[in-house]
């Protein structure tokens, strides 16, 4: 009897829907910040192990990272597929980026692809990567540097946004902490004896604001003063800024970084402070495989009945993976409300039954694309050819 791959995928994901909903709500209702995602990691790992999958914990020195693996009963000599799940939250907003849905979409694609390999006797290996700390630090970059993703033929993840697309070109992103060190003094009795670190932070922020006039339209700079002093009658000896810069291309990020560093240094010179800049990993621009992306959009449009949109900002550490591996970072829309990510309203939408429905549909779409790669040799050749062409052209971009 012929086996319908689409039916296998649908049965696997629909059959797990109640469990996936439970996982999603457990993560959403207990938001955990960067590298503190203990409960989210636990519920995901427990579910995978209870479903019969092997799980490796504490991956790449990250206590909340994991890898779940399925090796086909037909052998491991086929394609090596990888899916990514995220589950960290935002300070004060919770899951305003919908990482609870990213988590279960990764699980759903992993379950469906494993089922297809088993039912259709397709050789290969599929892994689910639990990737913490996307909102800051860049857990995937740490894992990449440790060789965790080596030997993957294809990497994929899905992300909820106000729109859908299979061709999202994300912004490069570099976050940093800038500290100014001055000298404390009584603000009324002897202000001349102090060196005002708070003023240095203010000058830096004002100068970055003035710098925007000379920035390219698709460049972004934004930050906050996290510590500007402790008391109004004390000249602050310490201040701290958290700042992020974004550009369209990696080569441009270097240019903007240099200009930004001069601003921070100038603020220190103007006030007599010393300063220290601590940089995180740079998030590079995402490069979706065009063949995979086109198929993703074709399937998604059949349900959304609206054309895809690509003009959406934001950055992701998955971009660093896309620079090296054949990949797809598919975006999917939640409820049609067009509420932007990183808002309280988006966090509310990410808990809805409607969002769950669209997450499962996006996961079925991702699994169908992977199945096509596994079973259609000519299609996979097209995917690889498109990747090779983009890699050759990337020398002009960086």
Image (tube, grey):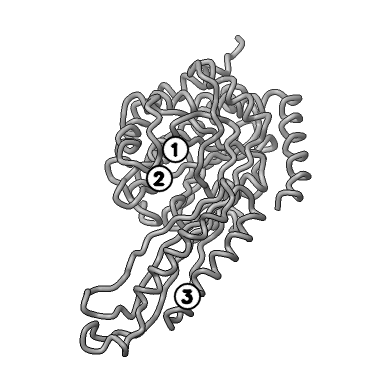
Question: What secondary structure is marked by label 2?
Answer: loop
Q: Is residue 290 left or right of residue 8?
A: right
The residue where tag 3 is placed is 276
Q: Residue at the top extreme?
A: 1
Q: Between disc 2 and disc 1, whose residue precedes?
A: 2
Q: Are marks 1 and 3 in contact (CB under 8 Å)?
A: no
Residue 318 horizontal/vertical position (percent): 55, 46
The residue where tag 1 is placed is 102
Q: Residue at x 53, y 15 (%)?
A: 302
The residue where tag 2 is placed is 87
Q: Is residue 53 left or right of residue 22?
A: right
- Front in this rendered view, residue 176 or 83: 176
Q: Nearer the viewer, mark 2 or mark 3?
A: 3
Q: Residue at x 37, y 82 (%)?
A: 182
**Can see residue 154?**
yes
Label 3 neighbour load within 10 Å: few <14, some 14-19, many 20+: some
Q: Between disc 2 and disc 3, whose residue precedes?
A: 2
Measure how far apart labels 2 and 3 are at the Cα level: 31 Å
Q: Are marks 2 and 1 in contact (CB under 8 Å)?
A: yes
Image quarter of the N terminus: top right
Residue 339 horizontal/vertical position (percent): 37, 33
- Front in this rendered view, residue 123 or 253: 253
Measure how far apart labels 1 and 3 are at the Cα level: 35 Å
Q: Residue at x 24, y 82 (%)?
A: 187
Residue 3 horizontal/vertical position (percent): 59, 14
Tell me which corner region of the image, top left, top right, bottom left or bottom right, holds residue 298: top right
**Can see residue 50?**
no
Measure how far apart labels 2 and 1 are at the Cα level: 7 Å
User: From what the image shows, is residue 115 above or below residue 176?
Assistant: above
């Amino acid at each position: 009897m012929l086996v319908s791959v689409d039916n296998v995928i649908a049965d696997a994901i629909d059959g797990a829907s109640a469990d996936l909903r439970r996982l999603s709500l457990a993560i959403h209702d207990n938001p955990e910040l960067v590298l503190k995602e203990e409960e989210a990691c636990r519920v995901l790992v427990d579910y995978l192990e209870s479903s019969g999958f092997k799980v490796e914990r504490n991956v790449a020195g990250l206590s909340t990272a994991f890898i779940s693996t399925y090796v086909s009963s037909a052998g491991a000599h086929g394609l090596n597929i990888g899916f990514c799940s995220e589950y960290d939250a935002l300070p004060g907003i919770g899951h305003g980026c919908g990482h609870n849905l990213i988590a279960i979409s990764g699980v759903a694609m992993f379950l469906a692809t494993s089922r297809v390999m088993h039912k259709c006797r397709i050789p290969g290996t599929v892994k689910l990567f639990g990737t913490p700390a996307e909102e800051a630090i860049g857990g995937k970059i740490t894992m990449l540097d440790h060789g965790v993703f080596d030997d993957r033929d294809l990497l994929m993840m899905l992300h909820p946004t106000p729109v859908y697309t299979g061709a999202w070109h994300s912004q490069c992103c570099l976050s940093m902490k800038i500290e100014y060190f001055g000298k404390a003094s009584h603000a009324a009795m002897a202000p001349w004896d102090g060196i005002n670190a708070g003023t240095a932070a203010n000058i830096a922020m004002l100068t970055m604001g003035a710098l925007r006039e000379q920035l390219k339209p698709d460049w972004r700079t934004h930050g906050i003063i996290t510590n500007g002093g402790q008391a109004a009658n004390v000249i602050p000896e310490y201040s701290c800024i958290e700042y992020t810069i974004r550009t369209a291309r990696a080569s441009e990020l270097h240019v903007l970084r240099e200009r930004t560093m001069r601003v921070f240094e100038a603020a220190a010179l103007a006030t007599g402070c010393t300063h220290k800049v601590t940089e995180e990993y740079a998030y590079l621009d995402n490069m979706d495989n065009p063949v995979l992306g086109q198929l993703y959009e074709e399937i998604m449009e059949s349900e959304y009945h609206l054309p895809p949109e690509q003009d959406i900002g934001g950055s992701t550490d998955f971009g660093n993976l896309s620079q090296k591996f054949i990949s797809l970072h598919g975006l999917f829309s939640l409820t049609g409300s067009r509420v932007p990510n990183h808002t309280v309203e988006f966090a509310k939408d990410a808990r809805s039954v409607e969002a769950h429905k669209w997450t499962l549909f996006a996961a079925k779409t991702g699994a169908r694309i992977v199945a096509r790669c596994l079973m259609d040799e000519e299609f996979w050749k097209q995917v690889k050819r498109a990747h090779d062409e983009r890699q050759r052209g990337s020398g002009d971009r960086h």
